[in-house]
Amino acid sequence: MADITVYSGPSCPYCDRAKLLLKKKGAAFTEVNVKADPAKLEEMMTRANGKRTIPQIFINNQHIGGCDDLYALDAAGKLDSLLAS
């Protein structure tokens, strides 16, 4: 099973949509609330090459991007294979 990290925050509709898709796919993920911990925000920005928007999603340490990027991978038929690895 894939190692998935979702950097997110409360009251974020894009975060909610991304997590909903992952749950629909049956994928377990670790959620990191960057609003509650400034050190985690710095960690996210380092991993995501300076990006500050949430969510930022990583699958097996590969930076996927945000919610739209996750849905684009799914629409292209590439998300399931990433989740299975």
Image: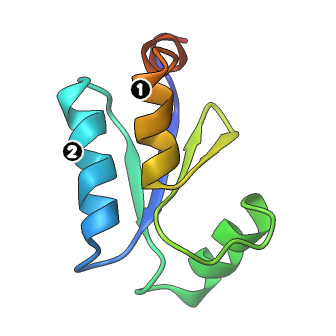
Quarter-of-image position of residue 11: bottom left
Instruction: Describe residue 44's horizontal placement relative to residue 17 as left or right.
Output: right
Viewer-closest of 33 and 64: 64
Instruction: Describe residue 52's horizontal placement relative to residue 82 as left or right.
Output: right
Question: In the image, what residue type sits under mark 1?
Answer: Asp
Q: Residue at x 69, y 79 (%)?
A: 42
Residue 35 at x, y = what percent? 43, 86
Mark 2 surroundings within 10 Å by alpha-carbon count, few (fewer than 14), some (14 through 19), many (20 or more): few
Query: Which colour style is shown?
Result: rainbow
Q: Residue at x 68, y 38 (%)?
A: 61
Q: What residue sits right under mark 1 in the picture?
A: 74
Question: In the image, what residue type sits under mark 2?
Answer: Leu
Q: What residue sits right under mark 2 in the picture?
A: 20
Quarter-of-image position of residue 16: bottom left
Instruction: Describe residue 70's horizontal placement relative to residue 28 as left or right.
Output: right
Q: Residue at x 22, y 35 (%)?
A: 23
Q: How many marks?
A: 2
Q: Is residue 4 above or below residue 10?
A: above
For label 2, the SS is helix
What separation in Å lies between label 1 and label 2 (alpha carbons)? 13 Å
Residue 9 at x, y = what percent? 36, 76
Instruction: Describe residue 38's horizontal placement relative to residue 74 as left or right.
Output: right
